Amino acid sequence: MPVTFEQGDSQCFVRLEGDIGIDSAGELKGALLEALASGTEPHLDVSRATTLDLTAMQLLWAAMREAESCGALFVVEAPVPEELRSAARDAGLEDLPGLATSTAAQVPPQQAKTGPAGDPGLARPAKEAVPTVHANE
């Protein structure tokens, strides 16, 4: 399963594995919404992801912005493959914490917790060709 959600007492994890793209968009959106509504510190693990297409990056960006608007941040677990960071930068998502910047492999959480966020419109597929990067190239 390319997208998994795990709930703990004080934190939750969205883990991505393999190719994450348009075929996984619904599953990724659901996991991100669950993380935002959990009331715990959300963590993102992309260490086993080999591909993040533009749709996946847009979903992650929207979820991180929604968390920030609720006073929290997704903690991006290290390591983040350089190819994924490069793809985020190439897609124009330089502000994607922990993915686009090589020095921000882990983003520290703020004090506030996320609350139910509703649907921030996370799954709007791109109309352009979707760039794909493979971590093993």
Image: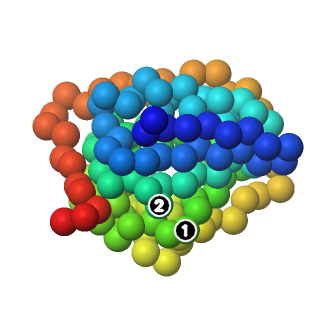
In the foreground, 52 or 116: 52
Q: Residues within 10 Å of mark 1 (few under 14, many from 20)?
A: some
**Of helix, strand and loop, which one carries label 2?**
strand
- x and y percent of residue 51 in the render? 30, 50
- x and y percent of residue 48 in the render? 44, 56
Quarter of the image for residue 129 reads: top left
40 up-or-down from 100: above or below: above
In the foreground, 124 or 82: 82
Q: Dot 2 corresponds to which residue?
A: 47
Kind of residue indicated by mark 1 = Ala
The chosen color scheme is rainbow
Label ID, residue 110: none
- x and y percent of residue 25 in the render? 39, 29
- Whether residue 80 appears in this view of the structure is yes
Kind of residue indicated by mark 2 = Ser
Asked if the residue at tag 1 contacts the one at tag 2, i.e. Cβ–Cβ closer than 8 Å, the answer is: yes
Label ID, residue 78: 1
